[in-house]
Amino acid sequence: MVYIIIFLLIICVFLAFRLFYVEGQIKSITNQIVYINANKVDKKITIGLLNKKIEKLAEKINEIIQIKKQSEANKVKLENDLRQTIANMSHDLRTPLTSIIGYIQFLKLDNTSEDEKKEYLDIAEKRAKALEVLLNDFYELSLIESLDYELNLEKLNINKILQECILGKYTDFINRDINPRIEIPKNNIYIIAEEKSLQRVIENLLSNSVKYAKDNVEVCLKLEKNTAILQVKNTVEDLTLDDVKNIFNRFYMADKTRSGKGTGLGLAIVKGLVHKMNGSISADIKENVLSICCRFQKV
């Protein structure tokens, strides 16, 4: 009987010690969490107890800390992107508005001739139309990037749509004295997409190549296994790898003075629409030739 009592006492002492030690570890974990939250340090929870449940708890807490850290980093990036977008938008709005106001003030001058008035009106109208394009592009992009924006996807002949878009841009190529090299297979390729969105993608890619090509433009549609690949290439000047990495970002322009020919939204719209149509898009540059590839699943 005495041995049983001694044995039970030993067990009680052991359990009491273990409980005290577990409580100490829980208190240590709590203090570490408080310290991490208060000081915002990059640190993980550590424990000194070989207990599977406590180890699992510490592991899950570390996962939550990592998720929180990533979330805060994403929040900072989004805030920076928003500030940059607002700054770019303000600049791009202010430039044509200032020009329009300036020409309107010229029109009010008494010594302005009728020919000058007509010239100033034409310039003001051109600036107003550029402003309208910018606002329309920004509105379209905001719609595309919204989570609830859906496309009416259907089976489409990409060969036919590409040919129509190239014919629509024929005058632009002629005006730039560019004779594009075009490769479209004889066999029709079908993909799942929305017709007006696919047209918008192709038109934006062609417009971008016409505006910024140094001399040569290539448009190629091909089939690799079960993937339809639309590739638009054009020669460029002073375009860096960093420019290519950021080429699909909103308002990004290789021209840092933002005095170029576009709004900086065209390729961002392309990327958004391609992703909405379950495709992928990439850009690369080799030997001063910019290549943009869109990939869609063949059906």
Image: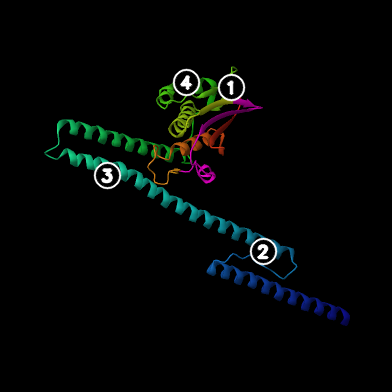
**Magenta-tinted stretch:** 222-250
Amino acid marked by disc 2: Ala
Q: Where 36 sits versus 16, above or below?
A: above
Cα distance between the residues tagged 1 and 3? 48 Å
Eye-nearest disc, 1 or 2: 1
User: Cα distance, mark 2 to mark 3?
Assistant: 59 Å
Residue at 14% of width from left, 33% of height from top? 113
Tell me which residue sits at (23%, 42%) in the image.
Answer: 102
Of labels 2 and 4, earlier in sequence is: 2
Task: Please report contact status of discs 1 and 4: CB closer than 8 Å, yes or no.
Answer: no
Count of numbered labels shown in the rendering = 4
Q: Nearer the viewer, residue 287 or 171?
A: 287
- Mark 4: secondary structure: helix
For residue 245, say whether it is visible.
yes
Q: Looking at the image, is mark 3 or mark 4 nearer the viewer?
A: 3
Which of the 4 image quarters holds residue 286? top right
> Pointer 4: what residue?
164
Residue 206 spot, x, y in % from top left: 47, 29
Residue under label 1, please give it: 189
- Residue name at image x 51 percent, y 33 percent: 235
* Secondary structure under the numbered disc 3 in the rendered image: helix
Mark 2 or mark 3, whichever is nearer to me? 3
Sooner in the amino-acid sequence: mark 1 or mark 4: 4
Spatial CA distance of label 1 from label 2 is 54 Å
CB atoms of marks 2 and 3 within 8 Å: no
**Label 1 crowd bin: few (<14), some (14–19), many (20+), radius 10 Å:** many
Find disc 3 in the rendering and name its residue: 98
In the image, taking residue 257 as reference, residue 73 lies left or right, namely right
Q: Position of residue 57 (x, y in %)?
A: 67, 62
Mark toward the viewer: 1 or 4? 4
